Amino acid sequence: MSVRDELGQLSTAEDFFTNLNVPFDTRVVQVARLHILRRMGQYLKGSENDGAFDGLSDAEVRELCRAHLARAYQDFVESSPIQERLFKVHRDAVAPKPAAEKPFVALTSIGMAHKAR
């Protein structure tokens, strides 16, 4: 089984850290587990798009995955999930909101409503 297949079988963030032998603080992982794995995936995708996996041995692929997990983890040691804004819900929370339209009431409609009484 290749390293990538092996990683695909893992189910928890802690499994990734253990499998790739990356030291971690449980408190950081408990807060940012999904964010760390998503960021690792972004780094891996970038490497894949750049051809970094081409011609690598399984041991070299493992080391590249290890480096990306360690880098992703460090991102969240130094920052927070909200600051990093990997997920749409976090981006939307800080996105500028369009100005609400102010209701318009014509003065003539006020005068007519008063006369109708």
Image (cartoon, helix red, strand yellow):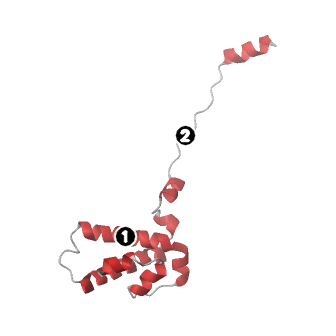
On the picture, is 70 further left or further right than 83?
left
**Residue at 37% over, 70% down:** 41
**Residue at 23% over, 75% down:** 53
Q: Which residue is mark 2?
A: 99
**Residue at 65% over, 23% down:** 105
Q: Position of residue 15 (x, y in %)?
A: 45, 82
Q: Position of residue 87 (x, y in %)?
A: 47, 61
Q: Eyeballing the image, is 65 above or below 106?
A: below
- Nearest the camera: 75 or 16? 16
- Nearest the camera: 114 or 85? 85
Q: Eyeballing the image, is 51 above or below 90?
A: below
**Residue at 40% over, 75% down:** 72
Q: Position of residue 1 (x, y in %)?
A: 30, 82
Snapshot quadrant of residue 108: top right
On the picture, is 41 further left or further right than 106?
left
Which secondary structure, mark 2?
Answer: loop
The amino acid marked with disc number 2 is Ala
Mark 2, residues whose alpha carbon is within 10 Å: few (<14), some, or many (≥20)? few
How far apart marks 1 and 2 lie (CA) works out to 36 Å
Which quadrant of the figure contains the C terminus?
top right
